[in-house]
Image (cartoon, rainbow, N blue to C red):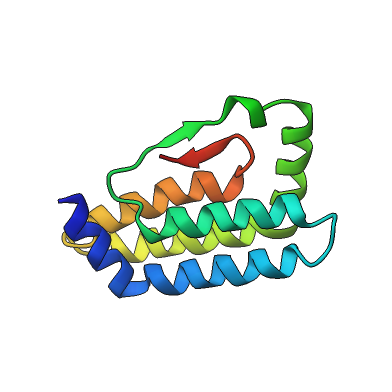
């Protein structure tokens, strides 16, 4: 099921989302200050490509004071917009029975979009 779900996900918007995350990561990596945020955008690009069969897991070495500060900066500048986009997509997908599995994947991505430091899909 996860293979078929991931193929459908890529065909119906996952590839475009991954390209968007990747390009955002490239732009963020242009400055030294943006490199940690760009690396998280690259991680999210990989997560958006194949979210079926994965769960949100904690990354222990990214949790702590520095991770909290980075998460706060991420939420202020990038995260809330990305999270709202995933939430809106989840609501649109949940309208039909066929779209409910895709809505569940978008809800997983909301968590990673809000708090990328300390969380990842695995």
Q: Quadrant of residue 81?
A: bottom right
Q: Which residue is found at the position 32% from the left and 68% from the top? A: 10
Q: Nearer the viewer, residue 36 or 113?
A: 36
Task: Residue 107: give x, y in percent of width and height.
Answer: 41, 49
Res 53 → quadrant: top left
84 on left or right of 34? left
Residue shown at 57% from the left, 67% from the top? 22
What's the residue at 72%, 70% (across, down)?
A: 27
**Is 118 on the left-hand or right-hand side of 67?**
left
Q: What is the number of callouts on the image?
A: 0
Q: Is residue 95 visible?
A: no
Residue 99, how many percent across, how many down? 23, 62
Where is residue 101 drawn, in percent x and y? 24, 53
Q: Residue furthest right?
A: 32
Whether residue 101 is situated above or below residue 16 in the rendered picture: above
Locate the C terminus and report the quarter of the image it occupies: top left
- Left or right of 46? Residue 13 is left
Q: Is residue 53 above or below residue 18?
A: above
Position of residue 65 relative to residue 41, above or below, is above
- Whether residue 19 is visible, yes or no, is yes
Q: Which residue appears at 61% of the width and 42% of the height?
A: 115
Q: Position of residue 95 (x, y in %)?
A: 26, 63
- Residue 62 appears in which quarter of the rendering? top right
């Amino acid at each position: 099921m996860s293979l078929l779900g991931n193929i459908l996900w890529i065909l119906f918007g996952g590839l475009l989302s991954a390209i968007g995350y990747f390009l955002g990561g490239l732009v963020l990596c242009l400055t030294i200050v943006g490199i940690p945020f760009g690396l998280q955008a690259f991680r999210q690009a990989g997560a958006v490509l194949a979210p079926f069969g994965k769960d949100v897991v904690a990354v222990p070495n990214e949790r702590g004071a520095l991770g909290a500060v980075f998460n706060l900066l991420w939420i202020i500048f990038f995260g809330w917009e990305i999270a709202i986009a995933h939430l809106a997509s989840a609501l649109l997908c949940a309208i039909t029975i066929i779209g409910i599995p895709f809505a569940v994947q978008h809800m997983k991505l909301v968590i990673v979009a809000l708090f990328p430091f300390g969380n990842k899909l695995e």
